[in-house]
Amino acid sequence: MKSAVIVFPGSNCDRDLAVAFRDATGVAPAMIWHRETSLPDGIDLIGVPGGFSYGDYLRSGAMAARSPVMRAVADAAARGVRVFGVCNGFQVLTEAGLLPGALMRNAGINFVCRDVDLTVENSDSPFTRLYASGETITIPVAHHDGNYTADDVTLDRLESEGRVAFRYGSAVNGSARNIAGILNDAGNVLGMMPHPERMVEAAHGRSDGRRLFEGLLEGVAA
Amino acid sequence: MKARVYVTLKNGVLDPQGKAIHHALEGLGFGGVQDVRAGKLIELELADGTSDADLDAMCRKLLANTVIENYRIERAA
């Protein structure tokens, strides 16, 4: 299992994500600076971390999505490499066009930072296969721009195609249909606002996020 | 050559910042404000001969997120 974590100026969850990848896969990921134009050969998994890339200038994730490395990430995603975006990483993936929709300012305007209940909507993806469909898990959120928005046609399609991976148990940020995380049409790209990498070991209080990372090992050469 | 790009949220897209500004105006005692929408103004200093097509591409590729935003380009003479 070969993984990488992309690092933008202003990323601040890159090390948390790297630790979660390392603990689940047994191998430390390559940390890839955003100016790079290629990724390590034979990569299986790419993490796009949380944080405030480029200080959220213009729009959250907008500048990072146009970084040189994102062309390589898009190429890898098209080849079927698993791409996992958390929080700002989710914003980057939508801005880069790898996932539909957009993440807007929270409906309540305030930054939301607390543990939330999530319902696992689809347990068939590489990211969610170790969860049960309909299961409730607790994962922290910490964001200002997590209000998922898309037109009704897109929302209907996401739901009918099983591409809503996680939903909030109750309203958190105004997200359309309480969507917390979505998959691309091929199922190899996941973006989510909550931070599973912050709940992977006993010291975190709970380890509900751990199975997401462990599930990624399956179906990939060791 | 200068150009101005106005980026605004599409109709129907919730604008929490606009709502907050609206509430603040009401708090200051200004009546009669029916709605507030916040947007962005981006000023560009361009080389002479920059085409309309290039300017439009800049808007579509970066300056506006057309999922949620509209843009309007104003070119100075």
Image (tube, coloured by chain):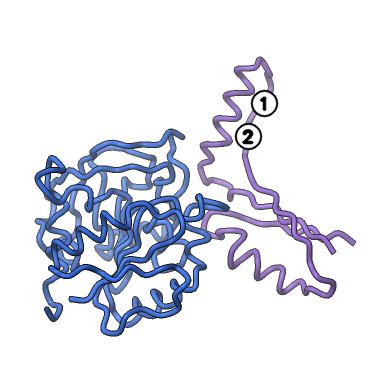
Question: Whole-percent x and y of residue A98?
Answer: 40, 68
At numbered mark 1, what does the secondary structure look like: helix, strand or loop? loop
Point out which mark residue B36 bears: 2
Amino acid of disc 2 = Val
Question: Which image quadrant for residue B71?
Answer: bottom right
In the foreground, A221 or A203: A203
Residue at 20% x, 63% y: name it. A21
**Secondary structure found at label 2:** loop
Q: Is residue A158 above or below residue B10?
A: below
Q: Is residue A103 left or right of residue B39?
A: left
* Residue displayed at 32% across by 66% down: A5
- Do circles 2 and 1 both sit on a common chain? yes
In the rendered image, which residue does mark 1 sit on? B33
Residues under numbered marks 2 and 1 in contact, where contact means CB atoms less than 8 Å apart: yes
Chain B takes which shade in the image? purple
In space, the residues marked 2 and 1 are separated at their CA atoms by: 8 Å
Colour-to-chain, blue:
A
Rendered residue at 29%/71% (across/down): A30
Of residues A2 and A177, the one nearer the viewer is: A2
- 10 Å crowding of disc 2: few (<14), some (14-19), many (20+): some
